[in-house]
Amino acid sequence: MSMSLSVPLTVDAREHGLTGDGVTNDQPAFQQLVDTLGAACAADGRPRTIRVPAGRYVMRDRPTLWRSGVSLIGAGRGATCFVLANPGAPRTPVPLAWFTTAQHGAGPDRYIADVTFAHFEIDGSAVSTEGYDVLAKGLGLQYVLRGRFSDLYIHDTAATGFGCDFLQDTVVEGVLAQRCGRQDPGEEMGGAGIGIGIGGWGAVERLTVSDCTAVGNGTNGIFLELQQEHWEPPRGIRITSCHCEDNRFGISDWGADGLIVTASTMIANHEAGFDVSSQGTTSVGGRGGIVTGCVIDGNVRDGIGFGNSPGPYAFRGNRISSNGRYGFWDHNLEGGDQGPASDVVLESNDIRDNALDGVRVDAGLRAPALLGNRIRDNGRRVAPEASGGGDGVRCEPLALVDEGAQWPPDGHRGKRVTVDGQSALVTYNTATRLGLAPWRPGAPTAWRDGTPAPGAAYRLPGGPGTRAGVTVDAPVTDVQMDGNRVWDDRPPPSQTYGLWITADGRMTGGRVRDNDFTGNTDGATRFDTAPVEVRWRDNDE
């Protein structure tokens, strides 16, 4: 009988040296078991499964090199927990499972195939590297074929929680990633809840991410990132029914083609709920994507940040509301594509109650379409400059209270309040209370250096005078703007104009028809630069 036939298709980890007592280092026995099952699969082509009963399994000082055809199944979140730690190797990241191009030669011809990771927890809180290390993940596999990652709880990792790249014919479902990117100061690569590198398989990567939750992670809740600038952005990726909250960005498309995002919520993220930009390693923004049926609400700055993309892109049927700056912000960052994006579509969205402009165009657009949107009650940041201190003023972990204030509700939303040498961003306000964002994703407080003392002096800046439903501050050519309702009906009104073309803005060619711009505070339209060769017809003003 061959060695492979003597290795069962399913084995119990406890029967092969793992203790799960929360003290013993189970990593050596775990590695040996993975190697044994991997060798058996390589010999006879039959995938194996490790069943891990309830317990706390310590993986200390070394990551486990994974093998093709080896699956890992626990007894459920909170029951089976893998505890990652590196007290004896502070320079060594300790992902539970890793297989990478740089360390192990992973590639399209050398991959991990036919694996399932399901029903367990990864606790990364005991890993601390001497400097930020992108490899200090919960899971760190590259080039996975026919994979399934299901019902995982990954938390408190030093870098990305679920950090697997180049996933072909793979499903990621029911993953909860919380407080990952713990050592990421906010500007490093990685540091996400779910971070997936793309492009390694060519023009098509068939990947579905569904029913996942990402809360309080250092950079992105969920992001896709093209890993080589010369690679073709891949099609075939879908994100559906996911929830991203209190991350730096909610969901980001940094290099896919035709990404589909549906039925997801992106709330209370610090920079943007949804982001397309050049912030990835290759400075390549996504293109051809569709975002539909999502709630993008209450993000500290912008609802949607869009730029560094050649286009097209479509946003249809979303609620984009109560964000701290713009509902939709078109802008380019340095380092990426600076040309005008073509065929950007905003259709049938409810864009309302954002602090500044509902739609703001600060980078060029070619042939954009705004169709049937309801853009109302934006420009909530109406409160003038304010300051105070002394009796009645106190700070709480996520609030500042001035009992003598009479602020207009949400009139300070999105402003930065300064208090005793510290600052924080305002998420909402009542007449006497400022709600504040955590100083970083996942933090329990807005105050990095401790809560200011009672009576500490504070200051709030003023707000801009013009806050339009749609603002054009860059060249826009061949526009199609049809059937939109742009108005303000919430007392006190705050959206100053329906459409504003600034002195630096241009609107050349195209058509604007059947829009209703009535009911704004200062007027229907304001043209510091007049439209040129635009067919203007049947608009209510």
Image (spheres, rainbow, N blue to C red):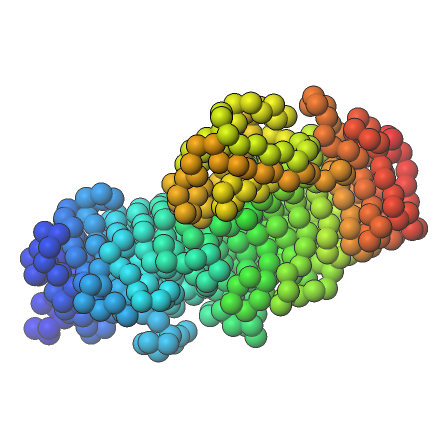
Q: Position of residue 78 (x, y in %)?
A: 22, 43
**Image height check: is 217 above or below 85?**
above
Report the label total.
0
Residue placed farthest to the right in the image?
Answer: 533
The x and y percentages for residue 278 are: 59, 62
Left or right for 280, reference 166: right
Q: Position of residue 311 (x, y in %)?
A: 68, 58
Q: Nearer the viewer, residue 170 or 398?
A: 398
Residue lying furthest front in this view?
390
Question: Does residue 425 appear anywhere in the picture?
Answer: no
Q: Is residue 451 above or below residue 218?
A: above
- Residue at (79, 28) in percent of width and height: 521
Which quadrant of the figure has residue 211? top left
Left or right: residue 505 compared with residue 431: right
Q: Is residue 412 left or right of residue 67?
A: right
Residue 364 shows in this picture:
yes
At a point 60% along the width and 30% down the height, the residue shown is 410
Vertical position of residue 108 compared to residue 340: above or below = below
Give the quadrant of the C terminus. top right
Q: Nearer the viewer, residue 438 or 225?
A: 438
Q: Residue 232 at x, y = what percent?
A: 57, 70
User: From the viewer's perspective, is 205 left or right of 364?
Assistant: left
Residue visible at 19% across and 44% down? 79
